[in-house]
Every structure is written in structure tokens, then in C-alpha cells.
Image (cartoon, grey):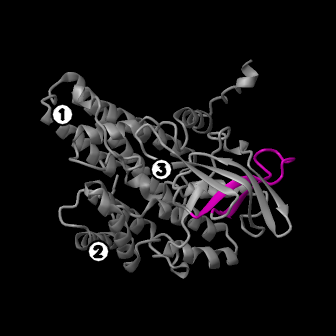
Amino acid sequence: MDVTYPPEAQAFRDRIRAFLAEHLPQGWSGPGALPPDQRDAFARQWRRSLASSGLVAVSWPKEYGGGGLSLIEQVVLAEEFARAGAPERPENDLLGIELLGNTLIALGSAEQKRHFLPRILTGEDRWCQGFSEPDAGSDLAAVRTRAVLDGDDWVINGQKIWTSAGSTANWIFLLARTDPSAPKHRGLSLLLVPMDQPGVQVRPIVNAAGHSSFSEVFLTDARTRADHVVGGVGNGWSTAMTLLSFERGSQVATAAIEFGRDLERLCDLARTRGLHTDPRIRDGLAWCYSRVQIMRYRGYRGLTLSLRGEAPGAEAAITKVIWSEYFRRATELAAEILGLDALGAVGPGNGGARLVPEAGTPNSPACWMDELLYARAATIYAGSSQIQRNVIGERLLGLPKEPHPEAVR
């Protein structure tokens, strides 16, 4: 297997490394190493640096203000940022650029592209995603939020939950039922809704680690323009699937880099604590190492499919199960290594699915325990492991579908 990149990719890699060396603070070890009162200022300056170098929307065509990079260049950029521990973009940019922006480019009307894409690039419009509901998480087609056309507006009523960046966004792209008489996978529409209006209420959700990166969003007679539908009225399911296909992007090729760096930190913790020769700890580290290598080759597989113009489809479920279970096991192993020092350790987290600490030294008990608390949900969010295994069994292995609970009774 030849995994070498073409010469032009190496030239681009050199360019990105030079950019990182120039713009990252000396001795950089990640955003969490900065004092809390400096992080917002760094995020603003970092975004300006990315924008001035054409590195904000690198996957967009140049005609829409993007970088127009090839897939290989996008992966190279993601790899180098991952190795340096540098943020590619703030969370709102991920939702606005990678998810909604790419979906608008693929399915949006000319007017939607003309209006929204420039505002996403400038950060004037900050987006969050309104898909999950209290009774519609893994079964996304069961959403109950309703949208009724009233003249030139949609009137929306319902509730969304686990809304990332909900407290900082001023727009939400949401899935709503616009035809309740249609089958549940039909009659859905993807709407673009302003949040700065009386009919939208946002309530932050504080998780076990003390973060509020998620929110509940309540919509009571909220309104949006009739033409703020992406992909056409009634085509919300296929539009949502298109949007979600952009969710992981080049991250499939960088997961092994990010988690491999964190595994090195875990090994250093074991050595520092004198437990690197303990058979149980060594077994745990070996398990983690094997998953990092599997993620590495899953990344090569995903990149190969993309270069062939093929979507990973159901295979993405394999990667999700591997990294989420790795994330939980690695943080649990850190707690085993820390022993009693893990009890009562408190520290602020970064609200992201990685082991990069937010405060203190990288191997402090507070950093690890903060990530342990966040990792408890890793096998649930972005598609639970149970659902992912059903996808693997049914769509990849051809096994019979799991009986519906109602049928069992």
C-alpha cells in the first residue's frame, strides 16, 4: 500500500507549517494552555489570521469566497493543524462553513448563496444546528417541530435539544415537519431561522463536567421567510443527509493524529506514576494503541474513497464506534493511573471530543478528570454505538433488522 502524497501536497504542507510557525504563540501547546481571559482574544486574532491567508473556507470554490483547495490539500491542512494542536476554526465556523455552507453550495438557491455565504465567511451570521429533539435523537425522522406557512412566513413551534453553540448563534438551521400527513421521512423541510426574535428561547444545558456547550431551544410562533427552505419543501430528510455527510469531512484522516498525541500523553502519565510496567495498565495502553492504528487505516480508507469520488456511507459507522469507545477507555485508563488523585479533581474543559486539556499542565488530574466526564457521552452523541452497530450489521453485513420494541411486545 502506497500512502505517500504527491509532490504538490508536500509543497502545500510546507506552506501550512510556515503559517503555523508564524502565527502560533511561541511554545504553543493548545488553546487550553492560555489563561481563560486570553482565549477569546486569541480566537478572534486566529480567525483573522486564517481569513487573511485564505484558510477559513478552504473546501469552498473560489467563486464563493473559499480557498478552492483540492481534497488532498484539505487533508494536508487538517493533518498539520492536528499535529500542531491548532484550531482550524471556532465551533460556529464548523457548523456554518462545513455543514450549512457546503450544503448551500450543493443545494441552495442562487439567492441563498448570494445572501448567506458571505455572511458566514465574515462571521456576521453564526449558526447552530436544530435537529435533535427530546423524542427524536437517533430516530431523527421522528421530529415533531412543526412549521406552517402563513403568507410569506413559516410559523414554527417545537423544541430542539443538545444544540451545539446555541447560546452564541444568531441563526439556526433546523428540521421541521411541514406536512404532518406525509410519511415521517417525507414531509420534512430544512429551514433557516433567525434566533434574534421573541419566539426563540435558548436555555444552556450544564453537563456533568460543568460546561454549557449545549442548549435547549424553544420555538413558539417563531417566524422565518417562506424562501428560507434549503433543498425544497418536503425534501428535508435528503437535505439533512447531505448536510450530515459533510460533518466529519477531513477529520476521518486526522483522528489518528489527534488521539495518537493524546495516547503519548497517557503513556507519559503512566511513566511519571511508575505504572508503565503494571500488566493491567500495559494492557490498557496496548488496547488504546491498537485503536489509534485502526483509526489511522480507517482514515486512509476514507481518503481513498473520497479521491475515487465515493462517499463512505454506512462505513462511517465503523469509525464512529472506534473513536468514541477509544475516547471513553483512554480517559478511564487515566483515572486508573491517577488512582486516589483523581477523586475531587475539578477543571474546566474544552467542550470538544478530544483529550486536549483546557487548564493546568497536560497531565494534571483536573485535566484528565474533566475529559473523563465529557467522554461519558461519547458513545451517545453523534449517533449512539447501539445505532451505529445496527447500521453496521444491517447495511454492511446484511443481517436482519433489529425488531422494533413495539413488535417485541
Q: Please report the residue visible at 52 percent of the width from the left and 52 percent of the height from the top.
A: 164
Residue that numbered label 2 is attached to: 15
Q: What is the three-letter code of the residue carrying label 3?
A: Ser
Label 1 environment density (alpha carbons within 10 Å; few <14, some 14–19, many ≥20): many
Indicate the position of residue 90 as horizontal and vertical percent values: 43, 62
Residue that numbered label 3 is attached to: 213
Indicate the position of residue 224 as horizontal and vertical percent values: 73, 65
Residues at marks 2 and 3, CA–CA distance in whole angstroms:
33 Å
Label 2 environment density (alpha carbons within 10 Å; few <14, some 14–19, many ≥20): few
Mark sitting on residue 270:
1
**Range covered by the magenta-colored residues:** 170-195
Q: Please report the residue visible at 17 percent of the width from the left and 24 percent of the height from the top.
A: 278
Q: Are marks 1 and 3 in contact (CB under 8 Å)?
A: no
Residue 319 lies within the magenta run: no
Front-lying residue, 14 or 406: 406
Q: Please report the residue visible at 63 percent of the width from the left and 54 percent of the height from the top.
A: 201
Q: Please report the residue visible at 33 percent of the width from the left and 56 percent of the height from the top.
A: 2
- Any part of residue 390 in sight: yes
Disc 1 or 3, which lies upstream in sequence? 3
Q: What is the three-letter code of the residue carrying label 1?
A: Ala
Q: Secondary structure at mark 1?
A: helix
Quadrant where the C terminus is found in the figure: top right
Disc 2 or 3, which lies upstream in sequence? 2
Q: What is the three-letter code of the residue carrying label 2?
A: Arg
Indicate the position of residue 399 as horizontal and vertical percent values: 62, 30
Indicate the position of residue 374 as horizontal and vertical percent values: 41, 40
Q: Is residue 14 left or right of residue 144?
A: left
